[in-house]
Image (spheres, rainbow, N blue to C red):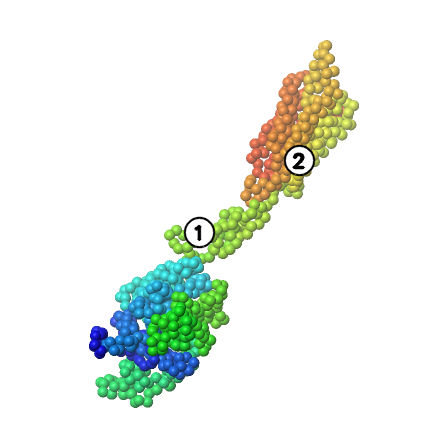
Amino acid sequence: LSSGEFVCQLRGLVQRPELAQDGDFVIGGIFSFQMNIKINVSLFLPPSFDFREFKFAQVMIFAINEINKNPEILPNIKLGYKIYNNCGTMDILRAALALVSGLKDEISDDSCTESETVQAILGHSGSGPTIAFEQVVGRFQVPVISHFATCACLSDRKEYPTFFRTIPSDYYQSRALAKMVKHFGWNWIGAIAVDNEYGLYGIAAFIQAAQEFGVCTEYSEAFSSSDPPDRLQRITGIIRHATSKVILAFMSHREIKLLAIELYKQNITGLQWVGSDAWITDPSLADNEGHSILVGSLGFSVSSAKIPGLEGHLRQLHPSQFPDSQFVRDFWEDVFHCSLNNTANTPKKPCSGFESLQNIQSYFTDVSELRFINNVYKSVYAVAHALHNLVTCEEKKGPVYNESCVLTKHIEPWQVLQYLNTVNFTTKEGERVYFDNNGDSPATYELVNLQMTNKDTMEGVTVGIYDASLPESHHFIMNNNPVVWGNELTKDVPVSVCSQSCLPGTRKVLQKGKPICCYDCISCPAGEISNLTNSIYCLKCPAEYWSNKQRDACIPKEIEFLAYDELLGTLLVLLSLLGVFLSMIIILVFYYHRETPIVRANNSELSFLLLFSLTLCFLCSLAFIGWPSEWSCMLRHTAFGITFVLCISCVLGKTIVVLMAFRATLPGSNVMKWFGPAQQRLSVVAFTLIQVVICILWLTISPPFPFKNFTQFKDKIILECALGSAVGFWAVLGYIGLLAILCFILAFLARKLPDNFNEAKLITFSMLIFCAVWITFIPAYVSSPGKFSVAVEIFAILASSFGLLICIFIPNEHQSHFENIK
């Protein structure tokens, strides 16, 4: 091609910036000074100026001018700016493309090397528009730095490789909101979002974080300011009928205003609002009807800061500074209610030319709370520091490996992008500015509470902070400022739970088909406790412990054994002593009448031995009462076995003597010489020794021992004597039974002897009682619980002993007494 021949021509109209200034390096800016949305007048606000957006643009200009005056940053280099005022995604995208391609209508081969591409683009405030144009300009390696676009999706470096922001990602805001909700004990909330990337990504991140902290969402809805009115009315209906009293609103100031107006009209009050940073500190909230609905709202916002000199810059604004800006003229006319166009047919008075913002009090000139404003300020300085590091770079030491430094006039946006990744500086206020690998800033927030200060004026009061750089336990910290709640009738923290807390002694059981926050409280079963609120399970008490009535503590189990000091034990002791007493009385009577025929006829030696053994039987029952010990356990069963065998052996001897005596009365019989006193003593000793051997074997192989029985009763410990060897126990008992049956048979055979031998009848009857008692003992012993089984065994010992004593000796006692009378 020949020199000067046109190579490229722009198709369509050139879009001029609203505010512009030439410079060696130009920074682009995209803001939306004016909201022009076609909406339903009955529900939506009319188009109006957005002073906050215009203020953002002026802060950008202020920061650039401040840098141009600062010899320490970019010395001898002037920064310029191109700031676009566009509303709507398509217009914003056109502005971004204009910043990338430049403003020339046509480019020749002579000027094709003269790029008009800006070094970086600041903005937009909304996540949706930012996502749209970042995907385009990112292909040209142009850095985009947003002060307000918080969508967590923008942290994806593959999708948005040139995006940076001086505001934390919604990922951190969502986690901060979830922690705050958990902190106040709200586990049942509603969630409403704006129907775009900002709201949908934000609410999704919040719900995910909330689930980690045990917070459930009753409903999740989304709408936008351009939706039909019935969409908003449907959402207010959901709010009216919901049981949750806390609502998270992840939306912009436009949507929250619409929602507040509709709720105000329907008189839906008493709600606690949790707001996202897009609206929680917006100054225009108090401008609309129904703003009282939002009093008490809580939400996180970026930290406030001071920017020296900014107020003076804002108050010096004049249309003459930007003669080509229609918006500045409209802004001026709106503030002073005058017309700069003297030829126009307007009811407004002409502007005098002496109007000044020096004495005007408005949001535009207010610098008392600079939150997102400070983010714009930091964005400009971040680009300036990147350019400064690029201009003053040292060979082979830049962020791009093995790259040489470039001349100032040849600096390209992709090089600025590389240096932005390494930016690290501190502002005049001491705030450190840097970006992580995803282009995100450090996550630091202030917890803001909307409170009424003056009539119809809301102010965001800082009541806490959130700093993700601190340890986990110190992320969220409240300060001493009082919190105003959404329900103005109470000073207490509102309650928003699906189910009330389960007190200690109960556990949570999830309700079928509902979230985990909805549950029933079920009392712990006996033997289990829960000593924490909202316990999900009950703990089993240790073996020696049992749950109290409240099921919130384990207490030692009641230890049960047959004690001397209880009524049953006392009665058995008295019966035992009564038996001993009667035995001793009979011994004394028999001893006193030892020379009488009746006593001598009853074999006095065996009778005294029988009375002695009965006394031991009565006394051995005492070994069954009291705290079981190792010695008492061995003593009670062996003493019982030996004494009863001694007793039955004596009765058996007496029975044999009766039979022998009858045989001896027959003519020619000398049978008595075979069972004389010596043989009687030997039989008793022999029978008793067999039991002694059995007991010795039992005690040697597996003796009885004290045992805590946990199985018979769940809430009691039964102290008892374990048998050790069941074979030993039943051998002892069986041997006693064997002797008793043998004695009974012999006595039964002698029952029809003449009256002179009526002792056989008494022995028969006593053995009948003895066998009946011990046969009845077996099922009674097995079925009796706890200490009553021991009482049954003692009763059997006493009953059988009393049976023998009464049946054998009392008739003889009466007969001896009768003979004395005669």
Question: Which residue in the rendered view is the most extreme toward the front?
Answer: 2
**632 relative position to 224: left or right:** right
Mark 2: which amino acid? Met
**752 relative position to 69: left or right:** right
Q: Position of residue 12 (x, y in %)?
A: 21, 74
Asked if 315 appears above or below 778 in the picture, the reply is below
Mark 1: which amino acid? Val
The residue under label 2 is 634
The residue under label 1 is 509
Q: Position of residue 583 (x, y in %)?
A: 72, 31
Q: Position of residue 83 (x, y in %)?
A: 31, 77
The residue drawn where x is 44% and y is 63% is 179
Question: Mark number for residue 358?
Answer: none
The residue drawn where x is 72% and y is 18% is 675
* Quarter the C terminus occupies: top right
Q: Quadrant of residue 64?
A: bottom left
Question: Which residue in the rendered view is the most extreme toward the top?
Answer: 668
Q: In the rendered structure, which disc, 1 or 2, sits on the residue that comes first in sequence?
A: 1
Residue 38 shows up from this direction: yes
